Each structure stands twice: as C-alpha cells, then as structure tokens.
Image: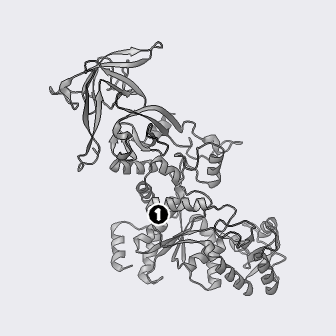
Amino acid sequence: MSEKMVEETTATEPLDFIRRQVEEDLRTGYFNGVVMTRFPPEPNGYLHIGHVKAICVDFGIAEDYGGACNLRFDDTNPVKEETEFVESMIEDIHWLGFEWKELLYASDYFDQLYKWAVQLIKDGKAYVDDLSPEEIREYRGTLTEPGKNSPYRDRSVAENLDLFARMKNGEFPEESRVLRAKIDMASPIINLRDPVMYRILHTPHHRIGDKWCIYPMYDWAHGQSDSIEGITYSLCSLEYVNHRPLYDWFLDQLGIHHPRQIEFARLALTYTITSKRRLRRLVEEGYVSGWDDPRMPTIRGMRRRGYTAAAMRNLIDLTGISTANSTVDFSMVEYAVREDLNKHAPRGMAVLRPLRLTVTNYPDDQEEWFDIPTYPQDKEKTTTHQAPFSREIVIEQDDFMEDVPPKFFRLAPGREVRLLGAYLVTCTGVVKDEAGQVVEILCTYDPATRGGNAVDGRKVKGTIHWVSAWHGVTAELRLYDRLFSQEDPEAVEEGQDFTANLNQHSLELLDNALVEPFVADPANGSHFQFMRQGYFCRDADSTPAKPVFNLTVNLKDTWTKVQQNQ
C-alpha cells in the first residue's frame, strides 16, 4: 500500500485500533507492505448476524489497504460439518458484497499439518497420550491449581512416532489416544498445559471422505493454516485472546511465517440469540419455520425478511470495532435497515385490514388512473406509477372511527379527508352487520378535487391511502416482530430456559390484504414501502395468483414505545 493511500485513509475518518496497527505496520514495513486476511468459518451451521461483523472486518480491512482476503473453511470436525453449510456460507458472503482471493479449506493442509506434527514429535515437543478425555480434563488443573503430567508424557520419540502413525492408519478406536503438545502443565495459561493437537474420529469427511481418521484440533490447524496462506493479520473475536499464546507457540516452534493475531469484540444484540445450539433447537422444535425464518438472526433469515446487504454493512460501521464487549440495542439494526430502504425502496399502496368504502356519487362504470410518486424520497427522481380508482375502494379499518377522539384526523361521519393522490371524500353514512360492526363506509367525492387538492383552498388535515376494490390484488402479509420479548433472552426464572422468553406475537398473518397492481407485479421489484405502513419485501412463497410480503421493518421505532407502555 502506498503512503498516499495511508494518508487518505487516515484523513477521511477516525481509525479503529486494528487499522491503526495495520497502518503502523505499513509505515515500518513489518510485513513488507502486505495486508492479507482471511475469514475462517466452520461449516457446521448457517452464518448469522454475529458473523456479519467478522466478515466485514476481515474483508473490509483487506479492501481498505489494497490487500486481499481468503475464505477458508475450518473443516476439521467431520462430525458436525456438511457441504450444505459450505454452499450456504459462500452464497451469504457473496450477498454481503465481498469477494475472496482464494477459496480454501483447512483440509487442504492436512498432509502438511501431519508432517509438522511429526516434526514436533521428533523435537520432543509432542507425544501420544492414552488418557481418556475425562482424565485429561482432570489432569489439566484449574485456574488456581497447576496441572499434572500425564503418565505417558515421557514416552520415547520412537514410540510416539509409531503410535501416531498407527493412529493415522486407523488402528485405534475413538477416544483411545490423542496427540498432545508437550509444553508446561504448570503454566498459568491453561491453554499451554499440553493441549491436544489430534484426536481420532472414524467419520467420513464431507469433502475428502475416508482419507483421514485423525483430525487436527482448531488451535493446531488454525495458526499453521494462516502461515501457509501468508496471512498477515489473523483477526479474531475476544475469546481467542486466551488462545494467542498457543497460536504463537506453535508458529515459533516450527519456525514458519508468523501472522499477527488481533482480537476484537463480537457483535452482541438485545432480543437476539446467536448460539448455534440454541438456534438449532428453535428450528428442530418447531418454534420457527426453518433456518431462513425471517425472525431468525441467520443471514438467510435476514435476507428473507428483506434486510439489505448495504444496511448490514452500515450497521457494522455504526457500531464500530472495539476491544470491549458490549451489547447493541436491536433498534440499531432496524435503524440501519430503515435508512437504506428509505433511499431505494419504491412506494406503493397496500391495505392490510380492508374496510370497504363506496363513493356513492361516483359513476358506476367509471375508472380512473392516478399518478402516484414512486420515489418521493428522491428529489431527483420524478418517477410515478399509475394506481386505478373506482367507485368501490378499500381503506384501513383504523382509518375510520365513529366516535372520534381528540387529534384523530382521519375519516369519521361528516368528516372530509384526502384519498392520497385521488379526491377529497366526505363520509355520509355507514353500513353495519348484525353484530353492529361497520362493514362499509358511504362517502361522496368532490370531482373538482382531482389529485387530492381543493380548488377553493379549503384545508383538509387527514390523508389516507386506499386501493381499488375492483383492481386490487389479494395478498398475504406476514407481520414479523422480534423473536424474543426480553432484552436478554437468556434471563429466565429457575427451571425455565430461553424459550420462555419467546415473543408469542412475533408473527401475525394477514390473508386478505389488498395491494395495488403496481406492488403485485414482480417486474417492479421485491422491496417496497407500503405507504403509512412500513417496508415490505416479496417472499419466495409468492404465486402469480397471490403474492406474499414480509414486513421488513416499521416506518418508525414502535417497539420502544410498546415496551414503555407495558
């Protein structure tokens, strides 16, 4: 990277602590001007909103400094990993707008990792241990008590080489032996107390089949994979601070290229759980419809809900990079989504809970088409679309009241309101069913107010949206809300688990909403702002006969008000 690029980066915005370190290294030539990062997910599930931060940091820093980022799958545990997860992660990262230099796998390096393990055995720095997993934990000690040496720690190099080769050849059952690094069982850093490097797993690998029956542990595979790829910055979340001494130890013992590991705080959100185990329970126990349920924090779910990649990337910019764990209010996510959609989403009319309105003095056989601004938020765009108008229209049930409270400026008996972009109408009566519920509103219109403006200058406070009952398309609307009702979903009473905090009103289905033809036509896009309602996106469940729309986010932060009023 040139000095000019460093200066420009510094001048445009304050630098976070990672970028300050990168720029210092570039200034001093620490890595000879190379910025190389990697995003190393384990393909054992679906990426979620927490991963978005790591992706943006790994790829973003490489982009900022003219470097490159690899996508490397940490596929070292065949028990949990599947090709399905690999493919979904590739698609989700592409959706976020990032490209990698190389698509790689930790399994690409299994041969080299094995050779390096043999080297450590020959150097007297690794040994085969016959202790069971429970015994290894018992021998490891605690934070206040040192561990104790395994009785197998002093095996000869020759015996260790023989046993390790036989482990590789599949001669031993699972959990009967492991390969451990020989460091210091009294170390105050527990991760340096002879950590396990290899375990036996007689499970076919999703990519390489039955070639191996021993698999490297994360701490053994990770740093060496970084080194092989020439990674200069191994960017990790804060829990890997305690792993850094072991990361450094392995690289130093092997005498190979040594990346700089830097840790940063994860993205934690209120009303959100990102534990893969807990998310799996939600799916398997039927609390949600699947991994792509729009209430899920998975990238799949967020995409289906209508969140945009630009909004997710902006969220990371808004929340920043720090060395201290903190929790971001979920309203920040909604703000980022709302801000992005406000710039790009076309406007359209949809009536969620229809109430029929008949314009009694409008000709029975007449219809008109009114120009409705499609992008009123963009002053440079003058695009409009045409909405049909007829004698019978529908409006929102909430836009009419018989007994009018103060500051209610919508439709009521004797009151005049503006039908958005169409006419001024005045309520002259209502039709009720046997239960006394209003099922139809009767109005007259003023033909001189075409476009919604009175030529005599009279003031009308209320403006409501509408859809022609003759032309409107019936749609299913899915109104999604937060999946959990508590800021901390894990905060439960004794004897309960996190599912006790599920929001019982996180999904409301509206089967008979009516949308204008512009919204129903797939050619006009998938994201819309339904005027006065919120931002919606077309769901994949849509059919030509009946479109389906998901509520992406409300026009305003209504959740805070709801919580304050409870």
Residue 41 in the image, given as x and y percentages of width and height: 57, 65
Residue type of the residue flagged with mark 1: Cys
Element type where label 1 sits in the image? helix
Q: Vertically, is 445 above or below 435?
A: below
Q: Which residue in the rendered view is the most extreme toward the top?
A: 434
Residue 221 in the image, given as x and y percentages of width and height: 64, 74
**Mark 1 lies on residue:** 56
Q: How is the image coloured?
A: one colour
Residue at image location 61% in from the left, 54% down from the top: 275
Question: Dot 1 surroundings within 10 Å: few (below 14), some, or many (20 or more)?
Answer: many
- In the foreground, 136 or 100: 100
Residue at image location 61% in from the left, 75% down from the top: 108
Q: Is residue 465 visible?
A: yes
Q: Which residue in the rendered view is the most extreme toward the right?
A: 151
Q: Which residue in the rendered view is the most extreme toward the left?
A: 456
Q: Vertically, is 101 above or below 480?
A: below
Q: Vertically, is 409 above or below 14?
A: above
